[in-house]
Image (spheres, rainbow, N blue to C red):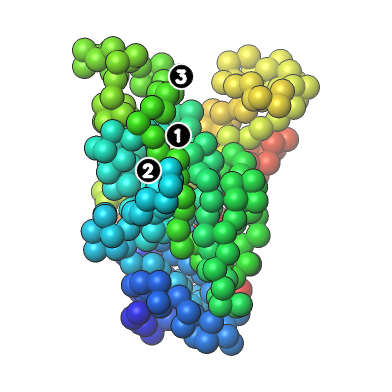
Amino acid sequence: MRIFPKADLTGRNTLALPARCARLIELENRTDFKQLKELLEEDSHVCVLGEGSNTVFVDTDLPHTVIHLKPPATMTQGIARENDLFVVDAGLSWRELVQWSVNQGLGGIENLAAIPGACGAAPVQNIGAYGVELKDVLEWVEVFDWQQGLFQRLSNAECQFDYRNSLFKREPHRPWLITRLALRLRPDTPLRLGYTGVREALQAQGISPQQASYAQVAQAITALRASKLPDPRTLPNAGSFFKNPVISAQKLQALLAQWPALPHWKQADGQHKVSAAWLIEKTGLKNQRVGDAGFYNKHALILVNHGQATGADVAGLAKKVIESVKQACGIVLESEPVTVRAT
Ligand SMILES: Cc1cc2nc3c(=O)[nH]c(=O)nc-3n(C[C@H](O)[C@H](O)[C@H](O)COP(=O)(O)OP(=O)(O)OC[C@H]3O[C@@H](n4cnc5c(N)ncnc54)[C@H](O)[C@@H]3O)c2cc1C
């Protein structure tokens, strides 16, 4: 374990927002967890940080103790077999896990290729892409409760997964460090190629979608994502900033009467998901900035840091978006990233 007082977090969030915390605790192995109980006893501001790709540090000076799990030295040290499950350490990089899985010929998470972040953060917002969500392959999550000093296992159902949501995100004040995930990765997982773009990308390479390997699907999705999303290393961002709102059939009909071209997708429960990016385009805000916080020119859902943006700039721009969309159509957009404030 290493403890850094007054640690700089600017390089630890993909929006590159300037921030500093009271102390950063870097945990290196499972024996470190037990010490957290004592270390955090008097601390009322604790937050866990993975790779910072879904976090907005709104304030620059944070009174927080930030806990970070260091990735294991090698992939094999971070992955264990338990019956028919693969148990992965929370500190592992999600991208590397997907690469490892497809290289082993194991399916289940290939559609989630190239999503930034640590494995421990994946259950927090039930990461999803190209028709697959983490909940589709997750068996259980292990957490360490730093107030009680105990490990606990939560089943898939207990995690209360939903679209970009979970118990962990809904109840952020629980003293829980996610330490391991158990995943069903199998050589016979059926491919999920419902997205036309993925099938087309495979066909363009002469690969029949029915015959594609997990590795080929992951590669096609990685290339698709690279063509659509800004790379945080060159244009700092946190991916999609707003969730696509889910609305009733009645509300959808009212919106379609006003905007027949509004993209929408029927959900299993009869509700409809509508495109947040399309609604944001309609507000005409896309060329606006607050300080150096602005929009990615190819996608209105992605807020970016054009250089010197602060968390307050990003939060200010997000607030403008939410107010404008609400005024235009009565829908209140929800932010996807987690915000960390001084108070
Ligand atoms: C370019 C880009 C593309 C993206 N694309 C997608 C996408 O397609 N789909 C998608 O779902 N997301 C996407 N994201 C969002 C992001 O990658 C995911 O949410 C990812 O899981 C965040 O991982 P992280 O380690 O960076 O989390 P962080 O930002 O470090 O943390 C996010 C939240 O998880 C909590 N947390 C992190 N680790 C732990 C732990 N061990 N225990 C308890 N809590 C923890 C934090 O406290 C915080 O509340 C994208 C982001 C970027 C920048």
Between discs 3 and 2, the one toward the N terminus: 2
- Residue 250, position as x, y percentages in the image: 78, 22
Pointer 1 residue: 129
Pointer 2 residue: 115
Classed neighbour count for the residue bearing mark 2: other residues with Cα under 10 Å, few (<14), some (14–19), many (≥20): many
| 35 or 166: nearer the viewer | 35
Tags 2 and 1 touching, CB below 8 Å: yes
Identify the residue shown where x is 33% and y is 15%. 209
Q: On the rendered structure, is 322 left or right of 287?
A: right
Classed neighbour count for the residue bearing mark 3: other residues with Cα under 10 Å, few (<14), some (14–19), many (≥20): few
Q: Say above or below: 60 vs 14.
A: below
Q: Which mark is residue 121?
A: none
- Residue 144, position as x, y percentages in the image: 53, 68
Q: Say above or below: 173 vs 154.
A: below
Pointer 3 residue: 194
- Give the residue type that dot 2 points to: Ile
State which quadrant residue 46 falls in.
Answer: bottom right
- SS type, badge 1: strand
Q: CA distance from mark 1 to mark 3?
A: 11 Å
Label 1 residue near ligand 1, CB within 8 Å: yes
| 333 or 137: nearer the viewer | 137
